Amino acid sequence: MLPPELPPLPALTRAECELLDRYLEVVDLLGRINPARSNHTYGGLRAAQALVGRATALRDALTLMHQRGESEVHATTLAQALRVLDGERRAQRVTVPPEPIN
């Protein structure tokens, strides 16, 4: 049995694709750094070291959008794309987990 097919990505500019890719990379790294969800310092350290470069790439993606005249962010469309790219699950790792129920 095949897994359910994901909905297609909405139409995005190349710069918007770059923005989403860089944003999700940063979110993934922040999730690895999150002390409430990790067990070892080394993985967090490596993620923090990589975060500098990924944050710079995110800044560059936004700079390029601005320079190209893409001054508005189409939040609804980008949110739809993030959902297709599993952004909700990936962003949950950045939050504090719920308190265990005893």
Image: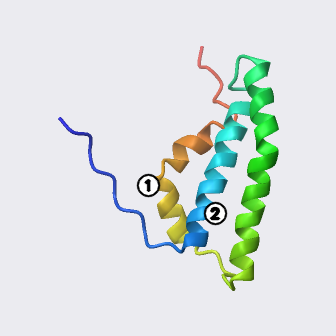
Residue 34 or residue 15, whichever sits in front: 15
Q: Say if 19 sits above or below 13 in the image.
A: above
Give me the residue at 79% from left, 56% from top: 56
Quadrant containing the C terminus is top right
**For the residues carrying marks 2 and 1, which lies nearer the camera in this image?**
2
Secondary element under disc 2, as helix, strand or loop, is helix
Q: Say if 40 sits above or below 29 in the image.
A: above
Give me the residue at 68% from left, 26% from top: 37
Whether residue 35 appears in this view of the structure is: no
Corner quadrant of residue 92: top right
Q: Amino acid at mark 1?
A: Val
Give me the residue at 64% from left, 63% from top: 19
Whether residue 21 appears in this view of the structure is: yes
Residue 2 horizontal side relative to residue 78, left or right:
left
On residue 68, which mark appears?
A: none
Mark 1 packing: few (<14 Cα in 10 Å), some, or many (20+)?
A: some
Residue 25 or residue 84, whichever sits in front: 25
**Quick one: which residue is furthest to the left in this view?**
1
Residue wearing tag 1:
84
Corner quadrant of residue 97: top right
Distance Cα–Cα, label 2 vs label 1: 15 Å
Name the colouring of the figure. rainbow
Q: Amino acid at mark 2?
A: Leu
Residue 45 locus on image (x, y percent) = 81, 28
Residue 61 horizontal side relative to residue 17, left or right:
right
Corner quadrant of residue 50: top right
Q: Say if 21 sits above or below 36 in the image.
A: below
Quadrant containing the N terminus is top left
Residue wearing tag 2:
19
Give me the residue at 74% from left, 34% from top: 47
Residue 41 or residue 77, whichever sits in front: 41
Secondary element under disc 1, as helix, strand or loop, is helix
